[in-house]
Amino acid sequence: MKGQKERPVSPGRLGRQAHPSPRSWPLTGREGVLSELTSLMGDPARPGLLIMGPVGVGKTRLARELLARTAVSQRRVLTASATESAARIPFGALAHLLPTTLPTTSGRPNLLRMLADALLADALLADVREGQQILFVDDAHLLDDGSAALLLHLAVRRGTQIVLTARSGVPMPDAIEALVRGDYAARVDLPPLDPDSVGRLLERTLGGPVQTSTAHRLWQSSGGNVLWLQQLVDAGFASGTLAVVAEVWRWQGPVQLSTQLVDLVSRRIGQLPSEVQRAAELLALGEPLGVTVLEQLTGAAVMDELDLRHLIVSEQDGRRTHLRLAHPLYGEVLRRQTPPHRRQRYCRDLAEAIQRTGMHRREDLTRVGGWRLESGDLTDPHFLLSAAERANVTMDFALAARLAQASCDAGGGAPARRALAVALGYTGHGVQAEQVHSGLPQTVTPERAELQSVQLRAANIYLSLDRPADAVALLRRTEETISDEAARAELAALQAILLATQADWPAYAQAITRARRCVSPNTPTILRMRYAECVDLFSHGRTGAALQVIESALAITSGKDDLPMLHTGLLGWLSNAQAFSGHLREAKATALAQYQQAHDSQWVGNQGLWQFYLGRIANRTGLLRTARRHLREAASTLRDDTTWGQQALLLGEWATTEAQIGDAAKARALLDQAHLVRVESYRVLHILAFQMAQPWILAAQGRLRDAARQAIRAAEDARHQQALLWEAELLHLPVRLGQSASVAARLAELADATDAPHIAIYAEHAGALAARDAASVERVCTAFDTVGMHLHAAEAAAHAARLWSRNAHTEHAQRATDHCHQLAQHCEGVMTPAVLACRTPQLTDRERDIARLAATGQSSQHIAGQLGITVRTVDNHLYRVYRKTGVTSRKELRNVLAAGLRASSDDAMEN
């Protein structure tokens, strides 16, 4: 797997179009506002409607969509656009709508009334028989006074419905303000799009899933401004930084700005006096900055000028007030336009200003270190090393690598090289990290730093280089060469962790025994022993006990241990233990919080890891399409990152999800890829990744008996490896498929041997099915639903319905069927065999198998090959299926089987 990279796919291969034009961007995230506007348009008491918002937020597009939805063929729509140039000409914006000459009158003419009469007369000549005409004026804040007064006159007089857009935060003609003051027009403010709306807009525009961090980054950079979002996407296309990787749109590299976008933002910033320009550039390079710091650097008067120009905003952080530029793109443009010599000087000024404050904030050390790098000040290797070590602790490993390398170049010695090796390992550069580690000095009686170095090297060999045997051997050799009892115990405890994750239980027992011999173990040893014990307990199905050990271990580390991977790894096992001990909500909360932290620290490897966990949790709750989304995104994120070496495990679990959704071909391709890049590390998870998918693939192909037999064979392997948790999962799989496999007795034994509550439910489910006890199966359904395993609950409800029906209890059968349907809808409409059987009781098992395969678009010949029957048999069964379901094509069949859910072509749009 190591070193393999996937070339970005051409955007056109996944998206509907490579370069979406502004007109092709669908209106998204404005449904509520559009509904409100439509209602206001129907209010006869107010003939006017004023849509306000910042430039580029989508006011014009929304107004046009509103007019398209509300105007009927008998209503004439007059359109005008105000501009700065036309504002100098009386009635300039409306000139094309007004008569070329005015009728002669004696005395002073009533100009406004004459113009209004002319507009209304044109409406009558156009044979407007129903309703008022509509006058739409874009950018009404630029109207000349005469045009604005005419609009007010039309509103007061009635007979014309007026729709206006105007920019917020700028002066408005008094007549337009009078429209709102006099209640002749309703004002609606249009805010920027929120993050979820930007994500949906990007996916609808690009025609495929967009990486969560990419969508968030584009929302953050654009501020939810649609015009600027379009410009960023265009720049991403042009530079190639926005492309498809592993079926997901990803932004790779720094934010790119098009010339047009730079011009737009520059116009918004405006021409600044030199002192104000300097202050804006300082803030662009240092934001957020404390009020006191910026005032010391620029002066209070300059800060007031920034505020008056609406270029800065303040935010509260505890008792401190920080300043930022008013929009993220202001900083991007200002940094781009700041010459290198000024940039270096400003970074030096910022570093000195923060150092004068005493650097009390946690992030001050790394920020000052980064500014020193930018300014070219590499004279203090010890300060750079301290900043690098702090960046490693806060998981900003990219910055840590730069700082550590600078410290090395400045003579920081072995400590700097050690910090560099850590940062390299966690940024996916495991080979380079090993080269640095191997060059560090070793002693027979190691100091704390050197003992740490050995462990970091072993972690890198295990995690990044996928050489578990070498990692354990390194630790064992070092343990044998030193005499310090505490150090020996610490090394043995770390070996116990690696051996437990390898499911090498005899060697694990020996290592943990050696660690426990220490009379006075230090805190790192205790932490490592508890980590190893939690993996042991979890793997053997004692998830409740594992949770207790993990929580006690987290209380020790709190992220302060000298091996960053220990804290993160413990949190991963915490999420797993929560997910397999009936605490699915807590598991999701843990994963979401850690994903957000990884996103904030820009640790790409950890982002992918927590997307992986989110996918596993979603699968367990029955949200298979959500699980697919998380796993697909994790695969894209981890494609070029070898920090964790878990891509093969991820692909295997993704294959299981695809098979459960019903896409056997996709599942098979993913499983093949998983085996191709199979790793040696994390063997404790290999059964879940590599052996769970195959039975589900067979089930998706309609080979339910073969699937059950395959699951039982895999369960035997799990039993031999003492993987009790995975054995239970595999033994319950035939039960979910409704096969009469003799697994109830062994599941009962596993329920007694473990403390995982779901295994007890598995045993009860198997026993109730074997006894054909429908009432007991319904209790199982309730138990699954209670612990959040909703797909399992839906399948149990389907089994209960079938048993009730066989016993001629029609009312009970219908109730169970309805319950199954309700649960399946909450599970995003999955079509596992049990749920599908409940949804299509009129079909035989063979007809249902063929129908499911045909609904995926497979040809009769392909289906015949999978099921080992003739093409004629397939066609005959399909004929009966069509007759029973009332459809005439495979596409219609898909809709019937999915109970009204979207077809697979829409899967890319799902959230």
Image (cartoon, rainbow, N blue to C red):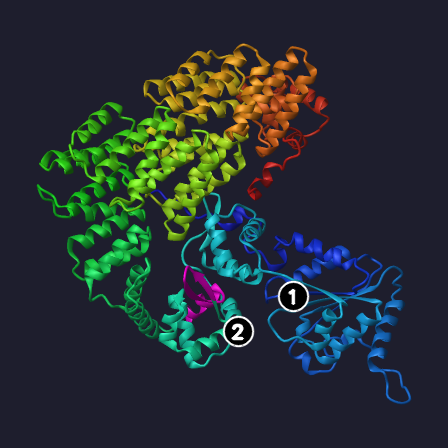
Foreground: 196 or 178?
178
Q: Between marks 2 and 1, how big is the CA–CA gap?
A: 20 Å
Image coordinates for residue 261, horizontal then vertical, percent: 51, 67
Q: Is residue 291 left or right of residue 121?
A: left
Residue 228, picture quadrant: bottom right
Asked whether residue 197 is drawn in magenta, I would say: no
Foreground: 547 or 461?
547
Q: Are marks 2 and 1 in contact (CB under 8 Å)?
A: no
Q: Which residue is mark 2?
A: 267
As helix, strand or loop, the secondary structure at mark 1 comes to strand
Q: Which residue is mark 1?
A: 52
Foreground: 906 or 622?
622
Examine the rendered structure and indicate whether residue 808 appears above or below residue 12: above
Image coordinates for residue 516, horizontal then vertical, percent: 19, 29
Answer whether residue 833 is visible to the viewer in this image: no
Amino acid type, callout 2: Arg
Q: Quadrant of the N terminus?
A: top left
Asked whether residue 318 is drawn in magenta, I would say: yes
Boundaries of the magenta span: 314-337
Answer whether residue 161 is visible to the viewer in this image: yes
Residue 483, picture quadrant: top left
Q: Is residue 432 left or right of residue 793?
A: left
